[in-house]
Image (cartoon, rainbow, N blue to C red):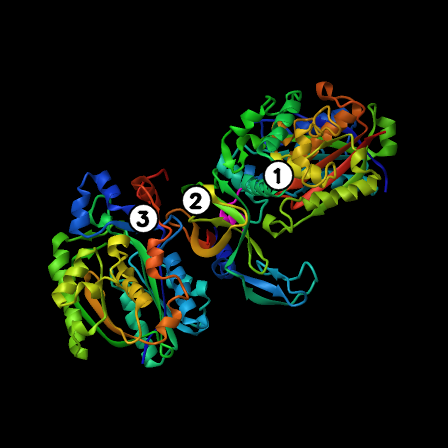
Amino acid sequence: MREVAIIGVGMNKWGELWYKSLRDIFTESALLAIDDAGVDHIDSMYVGCMSSGLFVGQEHLSSLLADYLGVCPIPSARIESACASGGLALRIGFLDVASGASDIVLVGGVEKMTDVPVEGATFALSTAADQEYEVYSGITFPGLYAMMAQAHMHKYGTTREQLAQVAVKNHHNGSMNPLAQFPQKVTVENVINSVMIADPLRILDCSPITDGAAAVILCPMDIAKKICKKPLVKITGSGNATDTIALHSREDITEIRSTKVAAEKAYKMADKKPEDIDLAEVHDCFTIAEICVIEALGFVEKGKGGKATEGGLTALDGKIPVNTSGGLKSKGHPVGATGIAQVCEIVKQLRGEANDRQVKNAKVGLTQNMGGSGGSSVVHIMEVV
Amino acid sequence: MPAPKYWREIPQRYRLEGAKCKGCGQVYFPPRLICSSCKSREFEMVNLQREGELLTYTIIRVPPSQFTDQSPYAIGIVELDRGVKILSQIVDCDLDKLEIGQRMRIEFRKIYSEGEAGIICYGYKCVPV
Amino acid sequence: MVGIVGYGAYIPKNRIKVEEIAKVWGTDANSYKKGLFVEEKSVPSPDQDTITMSVEATLYALKRAQIDPKKIGAVYVGSESHPYAVKPSGTVLAEAIGATPDVHCADFEFACKAGSEAMFVCLELVRSGSMEYGLAVGADTSQGAPGDALEYTAAAGAASFIMGKDNLLAEAIETYSYMTDTPDFWRREYQYYPRHASRFTGEPAYFKHIIGAAKGILKKVKLEPKDFKYAVFHQPNGKFPLKVGKILGFKREQLDTGLLCPWMGNTYSGSSPMGLTAILDEAKPDDLILMVSYGSGAGSDAFIWKVTPKISEVQNKAPKTKDILNNNKTYIDYGTYAKYRGKIRKAE
C-alpha cells in the first residue's frame, strides 16, 4: 500500500444557508480544498452524503457534483453510512490512493438539511435507525441517545452536569471557530435549564440541523512531497467497523462497540496507542455520545467519560483536547459533511493553522465519525510528517 | 406507512413471533436467515415472552409528526424474559415514576394511524406490571 | 352441550367523572348522577380502540380457556365503533391471537347488541358441529356528541368469550331473540356522532325489547326470576337495568354483581357481555344466570347460562373484571378527554 497524504482541506461557513443549494455548498468547499492543495486536476472523487434524496429530493450525486465541479468524466461515487458517510468516504478515498488506483483524489461530504421542515429533517435522520423495530415505535435520535445517557447515568453514576460539560467545552472551542454555526459560549446552567427534548437530554445537549460541506484532497506521499507547500499530513491509520443497527440489540447499551473496534484497527495500523493521540475530533451528536466515544477510543476507562470531561481531560488545554473545532455541537452537523470537517480540523491543527484554538505541539490527531446510534464507525489517525 | 411494509411485519408486531436458532438456541426478533453467533441457517418459530424488565428509557417530548398527539410519551428498551430485548413505548404509566429494573408486560395497542384516511398501524407496547 | 370455555374483559384505565363533563356544559351533575345513576366512565387512550381492547380481552379469555388458538373456527367482533368503515376488525384480532388463516371472520354491528349477536352465532356454529371453538367479542369505544346526554355515559370496554362444547365454564341452557324495527338511536354513514330519539329510547325501545326477550326465554325454559342467582341486562346507564330488573321481578342482589355502568359507563356492545364476565368472576357451580342485551334499532338477545364446577379453576387465571375496573384508574379532565377522543379540531 502506498502512503497517503492530505494536501488540501476546504470548508465554508456552516449554518442555515438559505441562499445556497446542495450543489453550491459542495462545490464551494471542493474548490477551497483544490486551491488549498494547489492541484490542477483530480483523478477521482468520493462524496459522503446521508440522505440528499429525503433532504432535497436529489440522488445521483456522483454525477451532479462531478458535473458542477467541472471534472466530468472522472470516476465519482457517493458514499453513505448515515452520519458516518463523510468518514467512510475518506476511508474509500484513502484506499483508492493507497491501492495505486488513483493519484489525486477529492473526498467531500455534504448535507443540505434546511430545505425540508423540521419534521422532514427528523424523519430523514430517523432513517439511520431501524425503521421497523425502532422508528415504528416513535423513537427519535435524541431519544436513542437519551436512553444511552439514562443507562450510563444509572450504571456509572454519570451526572447531568457532566453531560452539560461536553456542551460547555465544545461551544467554548467553537467560539474560536469562525466557520461554526453556533459559536456562542454556553454555561452548565444554560444547558441544564434548556428545553427538554428526550429525558435527560435537553436542546443544548443536541447537535443542530445544519447546511454544510467540506472537502479534502488526498494523494500518494511521493507526489505530496513534490507539490505540497504546507506541512505534510499523512493518514497512518484507518478503521471501520459496524454493530447492530438497533440499539436494543446490543449487549451493552452504554458501549459504542463499532467505535471501539474501528479504533483498535486504526491504532494497530498506525502503531499508536490512545495515549499517543494529541487531539481528537469525535462525533458529539449528543453530549452523551462524546462521553461514550472517549471511552470507546480508550482515552479513559469505561464509565469514566463524564468524570474525565468534568476534570478537563478533553478541554483545549487538557491532556487530550477533544473537538477543538467546536464539534458537531457548536460547529454544526450537516450529517454527510461531518466526517470530512473533522479531518479539516485535524489537518489545520497538525499544520499549526488553527489560530486561537491551536493545540500546542499537535503531532498526532484522530477523527471518529459514527452512524446512527453507533451502527457504524470510522476512525482515522493522522500525523504530521 | 405503505401497506405492504406494515403487513409484512404483522407476525412480529401483533404476536411477537421470533426465531430460535436450531444451532445455538439464540432467539432473534425479528427472525433472521442466518445466526450471527453460530452461522446456522435453521430456525424454529417462537413467540416471545410477554413480560420483562426495563433496561433504560426516555421520554420523547419532540416526537415524529405522526406521534404528535401522543406526546409526551415514554419509550424504553425492555429485556423480555428468556433474553430478547425490544424497544417499545411504555404506556399507562406515570412518566415521573419510571425506573430502570421495573417489570413490564406487553399490551396490544395502536402505534399510529396515517391521518384520518390511511391505514391504522398496530403493535406492541409495554405497560408497567 | 355448548357454552363458554373462556372469557375475559378489558377496560382502559382512564376515567372521567360526571362532574367534569357537567362543568364544561353548565349542567347539573347531580341530576345525571341520580337520574342516570352514573358516577364516572372509562375513556380509551389515544392508542386504544375496539381492536386493541378486543385483543386484550381475548388474551385473557385464552388464559382461562387454555386452548390452542388455531382451533378457533370463527372470530366475530361486535361493535358500533369498528376503527375502519371498510376493513374488518376481526382479521386483526385473529392475527394477534394466532388463529389465522384457517378461520372464519366477520364484524357484527347492531348498535349495543353486536357483542351478544356474535356470542349467539358462535354458540350455534359450535352446536352445529362445524367448528370446535368460536370466538365472540363485544367491544366499543363509543362516542357521545359533546354536550349530549350520551356524553355522560358513552364509554370504552371489551368482553371476549370463547364458545365450545367441552370443558365448559358455563353452559348455554337456552337462547332467545326478540326484534322489531324501532328507530330509537342511529348513526348515518359519514356522521361522526350518533343521534337518538330522546325519551323514545326508553319504554318502546329498551324496556319493550328487554322485557320481551326476558319473558320469552323464561317461558321457553319454564323458569322464574327467583330461580336465578344473577341477572344482567344492557346498561345504557345505571338506572335502566335496575328498573327493568324490578319490572321483571328480579331483586337488587341478583342484579348488583353484573352492574358495572355506574362506574364504567355504557360500553355499548361490551355492556351486558362485560356484566356477564363480572358475574362469572364470582359465580359458583350450578348458579343460573340470565343475560339480556339490547341494541337500538331494535332488539334483544337473551341467554340463560348454567355455571359448571370448572369455573372455580379459571376465575383467577386472568384479571377479574371488577379488579380491572377498580384498580389503577387515572382521572382525566375534560381537555384531556377531548384530546384523547379527537373532539378538538386541528389543522389538516
In this figure, which residue is indicated by the disc labeled 3? Answer: C15
Do labels 2 and 1 touch, CB within 8 Å?
Answer: no
Question: Quick check: A121 left or right of C157?
Answer: right
The location of residue A52, given as percent across then percent down, is 59, 39
Check if residue C216 falls in the magenta segment: no
- Predominant SS along the magenta part: loop
The percent coordinates of residue C193 (x first, y second) are 25, 49
Where in the figure is residue A3, as x and y percent of width and height? 85, 37
Residue type marked 1 = Gly
Q: Residue at x 39, y 70 (%)?
A: C314
Residue B108, percent from left and from top: 44, 56
| Residues in magenta, as a range | A132-140
Depth check, front residue: C66 or C344: C66
Q: Is residue A362 left or right of residue C323?
A: right
Tell me the crowding category of disc 2: few under 14, some 14 to 19, or many 20 or more residues within 10 angstroms, Cα based.
few
Q: Chain of mark 2?
A: B
Kindly identify which numbered label has been placed on residue A225: none
Quadrant of the image occupied by residue A27: top right
A185 vs B44: above or below:
above
Q: Is residue A43 visible?
A: no
**Do callouts 3 and 1 point to residues on the same chain?**
no
Which amino acid does the dot numbered 2 rest on?
Asp
Foreground of the two, C194 or B124: B124
Kindly identify the residue that appears in the image at 12 percent across and 54 percent down. Answer: C199
Callout count = 3
Q: Secondary structure at mark 3?
A: strand
Q: Mark 2 to mark 1: distance in Å?
A: 24 Å
Q: Which residue is mark 2?
A: B94
Badge 1: few (under 14), some or many (20 or more) residues near its Cα, within 10 Å?
A: some
A170 relative to C247, above or below: above
Q: What is the number of the mark on residue A157?
A: 1
Name the secondary structure under disc 2.
Answer: loop
